[in-house]
Image (cartoon, coloured by chain):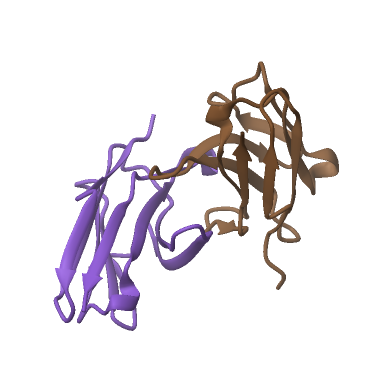
Chain colours: A brown, B purple
Amino acid sequence: EAGVAQSPRYKIIEKRQSVAFWCNPISGHATLYWYQQILGQGPKLLIQFQNNGVVDDSQLPKDRFSAERLKGVDSTLKIQPAKLEDSAVYLCASSRGAVEAFFGQGTRLTVV
Amino acid sequence: KQEVTQIPAALSVPEGENLVLNCSFTDSAIYNLQWFRQDPGKGLTSLLLIQSSQREQTSGRLNASLDKSSGRSTLYIAASQPGDSATYLCAAKGGYQKVTFGTGTKLQVIP
């Protein structure tokens, strides 16, 4: 089966600009996660969707970050405006039930 | 709230040694525990998945164990090789299918 697809793979933007990331989960996976991984740290959950509803967004900086999952399939994560500290790898994952989570290759964001 | 801790944060061993990486979690009500490998600048590669009903899983030179009652998992790497150098992450899947990651152990295997 096809894996989790993310795009773009790399993005460099200036601070205060906006950026969007896209994720296509594995077909049939109802749960979709977005993680932020800062260099040298473990991934931190930003938002978790169950179909198109939000399960957990407690660590999402809502003043600048937003995410949506239209029709319970693809998802986009947006940052507006970006700050230097947003430089990180953004990982998308999907899962079905209690089985393992599958991760995409990630998007490396550099804010200059 | 689930908290996952990995000790040590970094480890350097000579080639050929057997080694153990540790993962602790605070909430034992988990569905599964997953071990990942991450190379610098790369994504996550899933190594082993242990379901809550299992005690261990093996893949090649890797063996992962799970003790839910004590909130611990270990990843055992036999006969380490320089190619094993990477960061190893554990992640616990619990209620509402929430996946919580540990802080990672950075492993360096010296030739």
Q: In which quadrant of the rendered image does the C terminus of chain A lie?
A: top right
Please state the horizontal and vertical placement of residue A21, each as a whole percent of the image.
Answer: 73, 43
Task: Give the total of numbered labels.
Answer: 0
Q: Is residue B11 left or right of residue A60?
A: left
Residue B86: x and y in percent read: 35, 64
Question: Seen in the image, is A46 located left or right of residue A43?
Answer: right
On the question of residue B58 being in view, the answer is no
Instruction: Please name whichever residue, B69 or B86, is drawn nearer the observer in this view of the structure.
Output: B86
Specify the quadrant that holds the N terminus of chain A. Answer: bottom right
Q: Say whether residue A111 is left or right of residue A25.
A: left
Rendered position, A97 above or below A52: below
What residue sits 60% from the left and 22% below the top? A61
* Residue A36, image x, y percentages: 54, 39
Determine the residue located farthest toward the right in the rendered image. Answer: A71
Determine whether B2 is above or below B66 in the image: above
* Residue that appears at 78% across and 39% down: A69
